[in-house]
Amino acid sequence: MTFSITARCEETGNFGVAVTTRVPAVGTLCPFVEAGVGGIATQSFVNPYIGINGLKYLKEGLSAEEVKERILKEDPEPAIRQFVIVDNTGKAVAFTGEKCDGWNGQIVGQNYGVAGNMLVGKDTILETARAFENSKGKPLADRLIIALQAGQDAGGDKRGRQSAAVKVVSTEEYPLVDLRVDEHPDPVKELGRVYEVAKKELFPFVEMLPTKANPKGNFNFESSREMGLLQDSK
């Protein structure tokens, strides 16, 4: 019902997931990321505990491959699951159960994995992977959205389009990027539009927030006023 890309930025160590599907609010149950730990996308007949427990196991020190094997042993019906795991070494693994519907498949490379099911065809995941590899040097969220759009342009979900999401973590407990289009006729394109707005009106504010290294943060009244976050004092 979905195609997604899960990735680690080799330059920053950031983790992210971008995903789109034909049902609403895909961002609520499919992408799981934790700073310094890893990224997981869980899809097909979604089991959120693949993401929840998978991150826990990565945090305990298991590799992506070890987490995959543990998850498959624990899941009572793995044949209907699909997931991708990327660990903090950049190792990526993926799994597609034999009962996943429609055209389904996966691709993994260093620092990323792409998977999809109920798709028009294999070009969706091939183009998603190719676009991600060809966008090296850009911020991770940019690369994920570019890759998702390339996959959508190549065919995407066989049933159509409805929702999309991108989530990226850096060093903090809160996300660096967490944007969702929960219901839209062209959700990936809309996600890209929202992302461009967020670059101007949200991310500069996120950069001011308290961090573990700087609990006070870098709040700037003038910048906040320019972004419309404060009323003009005049």
Image: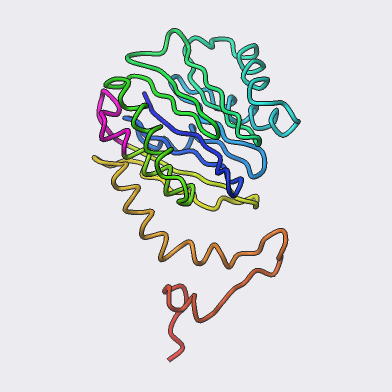
Image quarter for residue 127? top left
In-image side of 65 versus 106 (left or right): right
In this rendered view, identify the residue nearer to me: 188 or 89.
89
Question: Among all residues in the image, which is located at the extreme bottom?
Answer: 234
* Magenta span of residues: 150-162
In-image side of 111 versus 179 (left or right): right
Q: Residue at x 54, y 62 (%)?
A: 206
Image quarter for residue 166? top left
Q: Residue at x 36, y 57 (%)?
A: 196
Name the quadrant of the N terminus.
top left
In this rendered view, identify the residue nearer to me: 84 or 132.
132
In-image side of 21 versus 81 (left or right): left
Query: Is residue 21 placed above or below 205 in the rendered structure?
Result: above
Coloration of the structure image: rainbow
Asked whether residue 153 is drawn in magenta, I would say yes
Coordinates of residue 190 in the picture (x, y in percent): 30, 48
Question: Among all residues in the image, which is located at the extreme right?
Answer: 60
Name the quadrant of the C terminus.
bottom left
Coordinates of residue 20 in the picture (x, y in percent): 37, 34
Query: Is residue 62 placed above or below 100 in the rendered structure?
Result: below
Asked whether residue 192 is drawn in magenta, I would say no
